[in-house]
Image (cartoon, coloured by chain):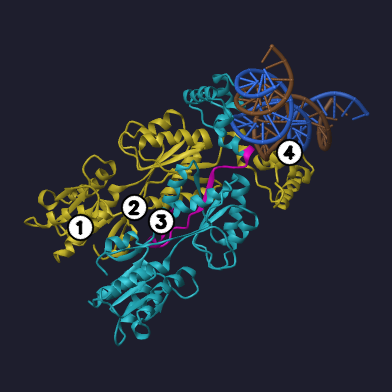
Chain colours: A cyan, B yellow, C brown, D blue
Amino acid sequence: MAEKVTISTVARHAQVSRQTVSNVLNAPHIVRDETRRRVEEAIAALGYRANQAARQMRTGRSRLVAVRIEPTRDGINGSVLDRFLHGLTETADAAGYRVLLYTARDDGHEIDTYDDLLGAYDLDGFVLTGTDHGDPRTAWLAERNVPFVTFGRPWDAAEAHPWVDVDGAAGTAQATQRLLDTGHRRIGFIGWPAGSGVGDDRRSGWRTVMAAAGLDGAAAPQRETEDGIAHGEREMRALLAADEPPTAVVCVSDSLALGALQAVRAVAASVAVVGFDDTPVAAVVGLTSVSQPLAAAAARCFELLTGLLDGQPTDPHVLLSPTLVLRHTA
Amino acid sequence: MAEKVTISTVARHAQVSRQTVSNVLNAPHIVRDETRRRVEEAIAALGYRANQAARQMRTGRSRLVAVRIEPTRDGINGSVLDRFLHGLTETADAAGYRVLLYTARDDGHEIDTYDDLLGAYDLDGFVLTGTDHGDPRTAWLAERNVPFVTFGRPWDAAEAHPWVDVDGAAGTAQATQRLLDTGHRRIGFIGWPAGSGVGDDRRSGWRTVMAAAGLDGAAAPQRETEDGIAHGEREMRALLAADEPPTAVVCVSDSLALGALQAVRAVAASVAVVGFDDTPVAAVVGLTSVSQPLAAAAARCFELLTGLLDGQPTDPHVLLSPTLVLRHTA
DNA sequence: CCAGAAACTTTGAACGATCTAATCCTGCCG
DNA sequence: CGGCAGGATTAGATCGTTCAAAGTTTCTGG
């Protein structure tokens, strides 16, 4: 078992003081070239690693970022956050930060966890996902001046904090336009009940394009339901039962789209279906879907967060565009 | 912004010394009841949280466990590790530990990362997933007496370290038996090339049951290929092209099973298909699949790890049984 | 060649906890 | 009523780093 290598070991080895070693690490420019070189050699030779705990105790910075991991749910939508997490970890790693995971049953419990993480680990910042109307978490964090970034816009215009989001409306608009371009005229929408920021946003993209094409009313039927394959199937059946059923549907999620697809196939109808999120299931089934640039979103989130930490003024609002992935269903 | 609450703050508030507060936290039994009560009240009143960094500096323990997160791959198989990660985080959280993520391009880079994590963050232990024959990582960790547990057996019998695994052979055996029970006699297997511990293990379950039923040779055709839907489809086509094609196939993964299923459906054949891992995609497509108890596996991994840390002798080898989830395809 | 400025380096304290060892009680026995 | 064992509590040192301030060397110009 190797001896523990501290900053003092390095200092002795390079024949300088502790502080000079520290300077080489944290403020290289104030150290003379020759000295710096000697110290760097000693560091390499001894395999020295700065002890984060000690550094953190002095500076209050931990180079740790926390992200909530949701309880395993429906494997379809869960994969979106998992992909985001992968991207975030990679970006953070590259910048010398690490990602700490935590779970929480609900918003209240999550706030307790913040308290715990901040008190115990001196976390540098948080990345929140899936913020909703009037989210108590953002208020709590903002009040305490804790750096954080959300993946998802604050739908309450009131409070402004740094965020990154994907333009859902642009995604559905793109999908709808594509359907129009390929000759469809009666294009339906299966969405979530009004009130969820994300769902409303995605619906608006479809509605706008349809309206611009002069298509509304019966040509643009819409249904609202909770997420889930079974619900998607039921709503699609309802749409198909109409006098003049749509020839295409845009769905707010892949889950609903998958259900819709099953309904379509069950009656051997020929209706184009587009989903949202480009989940692995969509790829397998051949479902055309709107794909979020999750890795890029994660990277931007992290950049925003470090910008906050270093006091660099970065544009705090980033809206990324999704892309439409064409497969068999549209 | 609230004042920072340290152990001294609590001590002053409860009219005792720092050390007594520390004792209440770490060795409650040596503190008199009345004193303990007073200290606990102060802790609650002030919302005190022990600073991990300071504690860690003294004790060398960080209550942090590291897990590698793979680069986003094929979303089908990736979900297995993600589900494991969710389970691990929940178990760790409940025990007051936190999970730290890291990435690595390859085994060599991963070892560098260990060095870094140990030196910088004083990690308590590692959970490794997907160990392979002669894995350099386990050797490196063992050599340095770093506590670690693997999810997956060490297939080189030589080195023994604590592990948790799911009995793949039992899973495929169960699947094969089910197919025999429902009248199938010609049951094929689509697996990975020989040499991967996991793949060979899963194949053996099928082979054993078939042999026990007196079925082998042409009745038990098998194919080997890399993982992936396209490969599965190709191999299934090959099987179907035989004189007397199998009436059922067991596959080593859901990816291959999904491909096999596509081949079956393409030619409108009627062949039962069973996959492995019970991924979300399998659920959607209706694929019968062998399901690993991932949450339980994660929990056992964590127990083993804390057992190691606390020096408690726990049975270091845990083999869990998977279950067969019946759906449409078998 | 020297004073003063600039550049570089070192010293001692501090962060917040735990460890070790010493001190203070308290009750009990002779 | 004094002494002593034993538990309960406290004081001081320490972990590895960075901060603040003081000390030392090197450079510059008159």
| Sequence-earlier tag: 1 or 4 | 4
Circle 1: element type: helix
> Gap between marks 1 and 4, in whole Å?
67 Å
Circle 3: element type: helix
Q: Chain of mark 4?
A: B
Q: Residues within 10 Å of mark 3 (few under 14, many from 20)?
A: many
Q: Are marks 2 and 1 in contact (CB under 8 Å)?
A: no
Q: Which residue is mark 2?
A: B322
Circle 4: element type: helix
The stretch drawn in magenta includes residue A70: yes
Q: Which residue is mark 4?
A: B18
Three-letter residue code for mark 4: Arg
Q: Are marks 3 and 4 in contact (CB under 8 Å)?
A: no
Q: Residues within 10 Å of mark 4 (few under 14, many from 20)?
A: some
Report x, y in % for residue A263.
29, 75
Three-letter residue code for mark 2: Pro
Q: Is residue A197 left or right of residue B164?
A: right
Three-letter residue code for mark 3: Leu
Report x, y in % for residue B18.
73, 38
| Sequence-earlier tag: 2 or 1 | 1
The single residue placed furthest to the bottom in the displayed view is: A243
Q: Which residue is mark 1?
A: B260
User: Is circle 2 on the same chain as circle 3?
Assistant: no
The single residue placed furthest to the left in the displayed view is: B243
Pick whichever, A98 or B88, lies toward us: A98
Q: Is residue B187 left or right of residue A249?
A: left
Report x, y in % for residue A122.
60, 45
Q: Which residue is mark 3?
A: A294
**Which region is colored magenta?**
A57-84
Comparing marks 2 and 1, which lies closer to the viewer?
1
User: Is circle 1 on the same chain as circle 3?
Assistant: no
> Gap between marks 1 and 3, in whole Å?
30 Å
